[in-house]
Amino acid sequence: MRSALISGLFTAVVTLFFAVSATAVTPDQQQHVDGHHDHEHTEASEGFDITGVIMHHIQDEHGWHLFDWGGHPVSLSLPVILFTESGLTTFMSSEFHHDVDGKVVVEKNGERFTYYHGHIYYANAEANDHGAFITYTEDHKVANAKPLDFSITKNVASLFVTVFLMLLVFLPVAKFYKKNPGKAPKGLAGIFEPLILFVRDDVALPNIGEKHYKRFTPYLLTLFFFIWFANMLGLVPFAPGGANLSGNIAFTMVLAAMTLLLVNLNGNKDYWMHMIWMPGVPWPIRLLLAPIELVGILTKPFALMIRLFANMTAGHIVILSLISLTFVFESFAVAPASMALTLFIYVIKLLVAFLQAYIFALLTALFVGQAVAEHDHH
Amino acid sequence: MELLTPDFGLIFWTTLTFLILVVLLRALAWKPILKAVNDREDSINEALQTAEKARAEIANLKNENEEIMRQARAERDEILKEAREIKDSIVSQAKQAATNESAAMIENARKLIENERMAAVTELKNSIGELAIDIAEKILKKELDNQDSQKALVADLVKDIKLN
Amino acid sequence: MVGSIAAVGAGLAVLGVALGIGRIGGSAMDAIARQPEASGKIQTAMIISAALIEGAGLFGIVVALLGNNPA
């Protein structure tokens, strides 16, 4: 009953966010769209802009670009939520009309915003020579101020899809167990039980230890499946997949920070003792070890953050590069080789998606295990 | 670099969503799932232990059965032995009795035969005696018709008597 | 120019990591061949060490990425 309510709620929320904005082609809009494309053509005139394409795909955006139809981009419109000096401002990302060069200004509550390559800025009063309402610094960066941006971007939407999928999978699995106590698992439960047992028996139990592992197993399960689902969703080449959520530094940073908090909030006396004043070694070495151990508190989650980010982003870059080979060489002869290589990397990425989730959960369990372990002093 | 600069918005949404997800799944999914799996594992363990116990019991029973069988067999052997002994003793007793009886019968028969013989001999003796007396009487009647011959006989008999 | 030198740096970092992970993999294979019954534990230990080494390599790559930024 409760699970049905929750999944219903999520469906409603997700549907709300994904109100498709098919591009209504008003003359005014047409101009902007064309302008945008002219700009791209000038960039692409020297050849296929592989870096630009890849960077566009692995970065976040407001609105979700689905495909180009007859030369016009079609996007899912997503809500833009801004905290400005005058309070909360919301509008749909479609109001920027697919512009990414700061040429369209949206006016809300007396404030003017423009969109420039993935970020929303306060727009200038006048357009510059290129028709953009922004000013550049000397090193070609945007000088305009940014409002505090809580928008439902592509990655946030992807995050919601991930969570929705997880609830869609695990609530029925839980229901199966409630309905059939003591029976052998079937269907979804049959698929996911080995993975759940894998996390419990191979990640939590051996690293945290018999005494404490039950307390942390639910968190580790959530962590593992969250990362895995996000990774897998990132590998789906079309919406609602394809966002580089788990390859986004903000995403991995949050998860790493959670591990940092979990480990240090659960650290017992022994853990801090070993951290600050390592027992069993001469005092000069203790002095030397203390700062190393204290820095270690931060470097361990930092490594987690970088590892997941770099692995997933690198995977996306490699796949996109291989697909782009055909367009770089502008020859269909390259296509079979490009496809074969892409397929190969895709299979590896399937493995990596699982492996990275496993490693993140495993190392978290390991660190937690170190924090809660009781050392017997000799 | 742009890629390495975390967006505040995404940090906010990820934190919020992830925390909600942890709480939701802990309450609605992991608890029932882990509990069910634990319960099932416990019941399987229990079943295995029960099976083990049952197997031990069966083995025990088998041992007991064998013991009983062994005892029964021993008892049977004992009984058979006793029976054989009894039979032997009965047979030997019977044999003894038969032997004794036959011996007695033979003895009886022998005695009877002896008696008969004795009787026959006695009768024969008597008959012979009577015959002899008859013959002697007849001879004597004939011989002793005259005086002379009586005297001759006495003389003869006297002659045979030796007075010693 | 800065970008290409950063790429060389990233390449060198990956070279070190490749050597390290290669050695771990080889040793793990040896260990599993010697004690197949302990393969589960060996695999876990192998993945943990590989992850830690990979972390060091990724630091190199990220530094190279940062250096690649012309600004």
Image (tube, coloured by chain):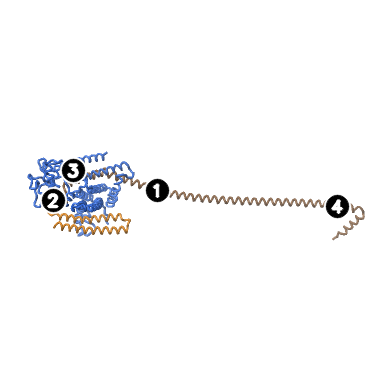
Chain B, colour shown: brown
Report helix, strand or loop for mark 3.
Answer: strand
Q: Mark 1 to mark 3: distance in Å?
A: 65 Å
Report helix, strand or loop for mark 2.
Answer: helix
Q: Chain of mark 3?
A: A
Q: Mark 2 to mark 1: distance in Å?
A: 80 Å
Q: Which chain, by letter, is orange?
A: C
Residue B118, image x and y in percent?
Answer: 76, 52
Q: Kindly identify which numbered label has been placed on residue A43.
A: 2
Q: Residues within 10 Å of mark 2 (few under 14, many from 20)?
A: few
Q: Mark 1 to mark 4: distance in Å?
A: 118 Å
Q: Chain of mark 4?
A: B
* Side of A129 relative to A283 (left or right): left
Q: Mark 3 to mark 2: distance in Å?
A: 25 Å
Q: Name the amino acid type tagged 3.
A: Leu
Q: Which chain, by letter, is blue?
A: A
Labels in figure, total: 4
- Which residue is labeled 4 in the image? B135
- Which residue is labeled 1 in the image? B53
Same subunit, tags 1 and 4 = yes
